[in-house]
Image (cartoon, rainbow, N blue to C red):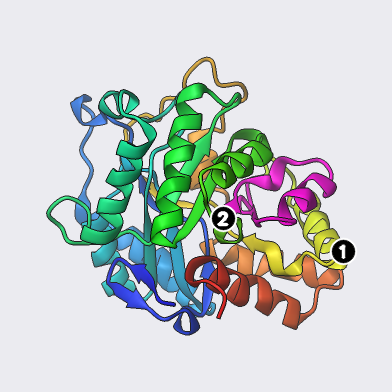
């Protein structure tokens, strides 16, 4: 089945190599009130186009930008970046976790109301733009709150009806099993779910347990501040050698640019990642398909297995099994 991109439907077979968790821009509500806030749209677009063209030159045809609604999602900007770069962009509907997201109005809504909102965006588009998301974003923080459970339940309800993928954020690789349980309780198809940010697991076995039911994301490649890439590569190699190669998706959670003059993190959030680490990691955006893929080859991962990871798995996640 086709998947919706910001520039229209794409047949799964036409996606090509796809990175499932990258970002064009991240914004924080209220930043526009800061006297130092002066984002240059043309500069933002030029920077993003440059980085996506670098990906295209290294064989990547599409990315998913699962930016939550409240963290600066900007479909019209994505459309311009996609058209100018030649890289397809699939964006999301869905809210973030409680500490950093979920607008007050939607905190007072029940699961079905939130699900109906997601479904409206998936079918009719965002606001008056007519631009339609292709995935649902869902997230949990350090502890899964009752509000997050409600919002995850809404994501499950909406996915069951829309037949699209869910891509999740897990804080410090925690609570992926809880996410799966909530989605399943609400009728979601777990084979179209990616449990994200499993990079911080110290052993590969908990990732394999999640991969029994869903896709798993080793999707912060290059963030040494969170986990060493050597361990990420070891985990991927172990998952492949134990038969989970068809469940692994790789990406980098790279942010092309931040619009905020300062990036705040709540004091209750332990060990917050540093903004600079999310922008300047001394690696090109193509690193996951060049340097990190090379580290996987050194561990015995074959070209056919890399093709499954970068092409087949994103296609089945986003467009469903053929």
Identify the mark at residue 242; answer none if there is no mark: 1
The disc, 2 or 1, on the residue closer to the chain's N-terminal end is: 2
Find residue 187 and report its horizontal and vertical position in percent. 52, 50
SS for callout 2: strand
Q: Which of 260 and 202 is in front in this view?
A: 202
Q: Which of 318 and 34 is in front in this view?
A: 318
Residue 29 lies left or right of residue 160; in this view the side is left
SS for callout 1: loop
Find residue 120 and report its horizontal and vertical position in percent. 25, 52
| C-alpha span from label 2 to label 1 | 20 Å
Identify the mark at residue 199; answer none if there is no mark: none
Residue 34 lies left or right of residue 182; in this view the side is left
Q: Mark 2 points at which residue?
A: 193
Whether residue 225 is visible: no
Give the class, few, some or many, for how many residues have Cα within 10 Å of label 1's Cα (few <14, many ≥20): few
Whether residue 207 is visible: yes
Quadrant location of residue 142?
top right
Residue 245 sits above or below residue 170 on the image: below
Find residue 290 and report its horizontal and vertical position in percent. 64, 70
Residue depicted at 40% across the width and 50% down the height: 158
Q: Give the range drawn in magenta.
A: 194-223
* 199 is within the stretch colored magenta: yes
Residue 245 sits above or below residue 112 on the image: below
């Amino acid at each position: 089945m086709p998947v919706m991109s910001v520039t229209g439907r794409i047949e799964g077979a036409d996606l090509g190599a796809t990175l499932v968790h990258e970002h064009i821009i991240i914004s924080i509500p209220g930043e526009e009130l800061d006297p130092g806030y002066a984002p240059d749209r043309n500069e933002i677009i030029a920077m993003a186009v440059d980085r996506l063209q670098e990906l295209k030159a290294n064989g990547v045809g599409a990315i998913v930008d699962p930016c939550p609604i409240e963290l600066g999602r900007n479909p019209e900007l994505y459309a311009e970046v996609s058209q100018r770069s030649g890289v397809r962009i699939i964006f999301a509907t869905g809210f973030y976790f409680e500490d950093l997201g979920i607008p007050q109005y939607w905190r007072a809504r029940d699961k079905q109301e939130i699900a109906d909102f997601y479904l409206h965006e998936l079918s009719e588009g965002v606001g008056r733009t007519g631009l339609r998301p292709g995935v649902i974003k869902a997230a949990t923080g350090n502890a899964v709150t009752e509000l997050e459970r409600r919002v995850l339940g809404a994501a499950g309800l909406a996915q069951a009806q829309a037949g699209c993928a869910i891509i999740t954020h897990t804080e410090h690789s925690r609570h992926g099993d809880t996410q799966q349980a909530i989605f399943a309780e609400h009728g979601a198809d777990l084979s179209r779910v990616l449990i994200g940010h499993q990079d911080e697991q110290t052993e590969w076995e908990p990732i394999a347990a999640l991969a029994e039911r869903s896709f798993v994301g080793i999707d912060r490649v290059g963030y040494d501040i969170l986990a060493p890439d050597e361990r990420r590569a070891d985990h991927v190699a172990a998952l492949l050698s134990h038969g989970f190669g068809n469940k692994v998706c790789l990406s980098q959670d790279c942010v092309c640019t931040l619009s905020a003059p300062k990036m705040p993190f709540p004091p209750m959030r332990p060990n917050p990642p540093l903004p600079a680490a999310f922008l300047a990691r001394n690696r090109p955006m193509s690193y996951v398909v060049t340097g990190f893929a090379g580290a996987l080859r050194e561990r015995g991962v074959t070209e056919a297995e890399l093709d499954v990871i970068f092409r087949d798995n994103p296609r089945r996640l986003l467009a469903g099994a053929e």
